[in-house]
Image (cartoon, rainbow, N blue to C red):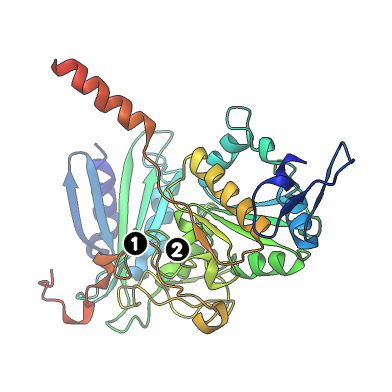
């Protein structure tokens, strides 16, 4: 439906558009991180595009890929009624250098989305007015939605009571067993045999 | 005073000749326990969807006021029963701990729902896997969310514990869901 938006991006940015993808009316463009802000700005200001609504901004961790993270931006144009999904890939295997320009200057609503993305995946947004954690507490170390964050690792703010102190076992109560919950998260991502795409 | 005469441990009923009304002797802690169990001032610490079920328990159909536990106190200093209703995240743990510490003795804690009891299916970085990791808990009411009947079971269990002066934790046994029975009865009727 908004194939026009992909054509617009490709004609305007050429090589900076790494790949495009269209399926069932969903159009996706992957943009080089150094042209990210420029591409967003063009999509916002060009009258035929006029993407005036930021629907979602998040990031995905692909530990087997390099660059490792994919920042995903969903845009909608209320004026023209079309959508586009914009992606950019940042960060090396260790998660370093995951930096991208902030789009808060274009859509003010991106502020909290970028804070959440920073909190959960650890993407640093250059030029963000107030980049700090939004969901986790400031004492929290690491970024929990990175695939190398251990699924069961908690960082309690209050020291837990010991079983001696409580005088009773503090394991999971019936009907839950100790090994229950988050089985899918216990996969060892360092030994993945998934093929890099 | 019917309750005082109930055969609880340490209670004896002595009627003397000539006293028409009769009188009862009891131990002081039994009397205090009896008084406490019917005047629980609750502090609802409601954080999640179990709160809906908590509202159902307080509303007329199930009517928690029958048990003398309907008066919510929105200051922990005036409350003696802490209802922990819902998931407790790591970020909330210091708040819950502090509220518990602000309550006056004697204080009781009821874990409402599976998340408060053991964390439920939240087994990750966000959630405290059961409030007993942080504060002592008297009664656990499992269920996701628990039915109001289960909550009342938990409350009665707590009252029983208060009356007996028993501080060991207790878990409410799961009950049969009456609607399921109804469905199975209807199925049997249909096949006939």
Looking at this view, is A18 or B63 the one in front?
B63
Nearest the camera: B161 or A144?
B161
Judging from the image, mark 2 belongs to the subunit labelled: B
Q: Is residue B24 left or right of residue B97?
A: right
Query: Measuring 67% from the left and 55% from the top, which residue is drawn there?
Result: B163
* Chain letter of the residue carrying label 1: A
**Tag shown at residue B157:** none
**CA neighbours of label 1 inside 10 A, class few (<14), some (14 to 19), many (20+):** some
Q: In the picture shown, does residue B170 fall above or below A160?
A: above
| Label 1: which secondary element | loop
The answer to the question of whether label 2 and label 1 lie on touching residues, with beta carbons closer than 8 A, is: yes
Quarter of the figure with residue A51? top left
Give the image location of residue B180, x and y in percent.
31, 32
Residue designated by label 2 = B118
Q: Is residue B163 above or below residue A195?
A: above
**Along the line of sight, the residue nearer the viewer: B187 or B46:** B187
Residue B8 x/y as whole percent: 65, 54
Q: Residue at x 78, y 64 (%)?
A: B104
Residue A103 horizontal/vertical position (percent):
47, 60
Is residue B16 in view?
Answer: yes
Residue at 19% across / 76% down in the picture? A64
For the residues marked 2 and 1, what is the alpha-carbon distance in whole angstroms? 8 Å
For residue A176, the mark is 1
Q: Is residue B179 above or below residue A17?
A: above
Up/down of A143 relative to B28, above or below: below
From the image, which quarter does the C terminus of chain B lie in?
top left
């Amino acid at each position: 439906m908004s194939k026009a938006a992909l054509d617009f991006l490709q004609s305007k940015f050429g090589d900076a558009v790494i790949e495009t993808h269209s399926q069932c009316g969903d159009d996706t463009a992957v943009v080089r991180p150094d042209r990210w802000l420029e591409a967003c700005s063009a999509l916002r200001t060009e009258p035929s595009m006029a993407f005036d609504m930021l629907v979602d901004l998040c990031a995905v961790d692909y530990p087997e890929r390099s660059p490792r993270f994919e920042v995903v931006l969903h845009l909608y144009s209320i004026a023209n009624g079309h959508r586009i999904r914009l992606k950019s890939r940042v960060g090396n295997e260790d998660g370093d250098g995951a930096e991208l320009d902030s789009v808060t200057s274009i859509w003010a609503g991106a502020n909290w989305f970028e804070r959440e993305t920073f909190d959960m995946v650890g993407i640093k947004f250059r030029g963000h007015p107030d980049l700090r954690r939004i969901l986790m507490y400031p004492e929290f170390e690491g970024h929990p939605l990175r695939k190398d964050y251990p699924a069961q690792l908690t960082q309690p703010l209050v020291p837990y009571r010991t079983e001696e102190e409580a005088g009773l076992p503090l394991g999971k109560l019936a009907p839950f067993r100790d090994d229950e919950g988050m089985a899918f998260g216990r996969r060892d991502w360092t030994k993945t045999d998934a093929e890099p795409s | 005073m019917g309750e005082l005469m109930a055969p609880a441990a340490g209670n004896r009923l002595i009627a003397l000749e000539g006293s028409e009304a009769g009188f009862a002797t009891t131990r002081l802690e039994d009397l205090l326990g009896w008084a406490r169990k019917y005047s629980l001032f609750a502090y609802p610490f409601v954080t999640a969807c179990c709160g809906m079920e908590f509202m159902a328990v307080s509303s007329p159909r199930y009517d928690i006021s029958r048990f003398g536990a309907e008066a919510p106190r929105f200051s922990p200093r005036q409350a003696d029963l802490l209802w922990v209703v819902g998931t407790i995240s790591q970020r909330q743990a210091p708040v819950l701990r502090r509220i518990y510490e602000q309550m006056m003795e004697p204080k009781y804690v009821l874990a409402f729902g599976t998340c408060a009891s053991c964390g439920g299916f939240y087994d990750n970085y966000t959630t405290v896997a059961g409030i007993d990791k942080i504060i002592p808990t008297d009664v656990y009411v499992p269920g996701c969310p628990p039915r109001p009947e289960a909550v009342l079971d938990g409350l009665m269990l707590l009252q029983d514990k208060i009356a007996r002066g028993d501080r060991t934790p207790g878990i409410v046994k799961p009950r049969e869901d009456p609607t399921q029975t109804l469905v199975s009865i209807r199925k049997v009727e249909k096949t006939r």
